[in-house]
Image (spheres, rainbow, N blue to C red):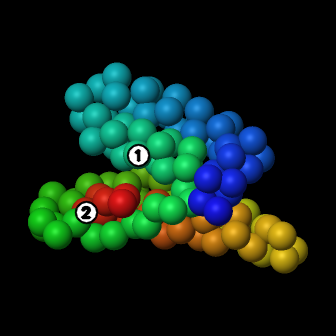
């Protein structure tokens, strides 16, 4: 079932979303300061290619101050908008019964995009 969901997700917008995340990640990786944020966007890109069958969890070795600082910078520079966009798409998909699984995946990506540092995708 996860395979079918991932294939449908890929063709119904997952590929375009992933490409946008990869492009933004490459732009951020141009500078040394932006590399940690670019890496997070690469993780978003991979996660948005195949969200079915994956879960977002806290890292067992939570790195404390560094993750909190990066999450604060992430929020202050406007990357919280990713969460808002995915939450809106999740609500739109949940209007129909067929779209509910896709809406749930958008909510999962929105949850990860609020505070991405200190979390892992498994």
Which residue corresponds to mark 1?
Answer: 43
The residue under the point 34% across, 28% down is 29
Q: Where is residue 119 shown, x and y percent of the image?
A: 30, 63
Q: Tell which residue pokes out farthest to the right in this image.
A: 96
Which residue corresponds to mark 2?
Answer: 118
Disc 1 to disc 2, C-alpha distance = 13 Å
Q: Specify which label sits upstream in the sequence, 1 or 2.
A: 1
- Left or right of 8? Residue 34 is left
Snapshot quadrant of residue 33: top left
- Left or right of 20? Residue 26 is left
Q: From the image, which quarter does the C terminus lie in?
A: bottom left
How many numbered marks are there? 2
Q: In this rendered view, identify the residue nearer to me: 117 or 121.
A: 121
Q: In terms of secondary structure, where does tag 1 sit?
A: helix
| Above or below, comparing residue 14 to residue 109 in the picture | above
Q: In this rendered view, identify the residue nearer to me: 3 or 61.
A: 3
Q: In terms of secondary structure, where does tag 2 sit?
A: loop
Badges 1 and 2: C-beta atoms under 8 Å apart?
no
Residue 37 seen = yes
- Left or right of 63? Residue 17 is right
The residue under the point 33% across, 70% down is 57
The residue under the point 55% across, 49% down is 50
Specify few, some or many for label 1: CA neighbours under 10 Å numbering under 14, 14-19, or 20 or more: some
| Above or below, comparing residue 98 to residue 49 in the picture | below
Q: Where is residue 109 shown, x and y percent of the image?
A: 53, 61
Specify few, some or many for label 2: CA neighbours under 10 Å numbering under 14, 14-19, or 20 or more: some
Q: Where is residue 110 shown, x and y percent of the image?
A: 54, 65
The residue under the point 52% across, 29% down is 23
């Amino acid at each position: 079932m996860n395979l079918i969901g991932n294939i449908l997700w890929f063709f119904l917008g997952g590929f375009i979303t992933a490409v946008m995340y990869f492009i933004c990640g490459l732009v951020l990786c141009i500078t040394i300061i932006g590399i940690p944020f670019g890496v997070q966007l690469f993780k978003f890109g991979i996660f948005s290619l195949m969200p079915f069958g994956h879960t977002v969890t806290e890292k067992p070795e939570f790195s404390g101050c560094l993750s909190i600082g990066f999450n604060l910078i992430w929020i202050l520079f406007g990357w919280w908008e990713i969460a808002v966009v995915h939450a809106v798409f999740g609500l739109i998909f949940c209007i129909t019964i067929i779209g509910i699984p896709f809406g749930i995946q958008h909510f999962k990506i929105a949850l990860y995009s609020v505070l991405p540092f200190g979390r892992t995708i498994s």
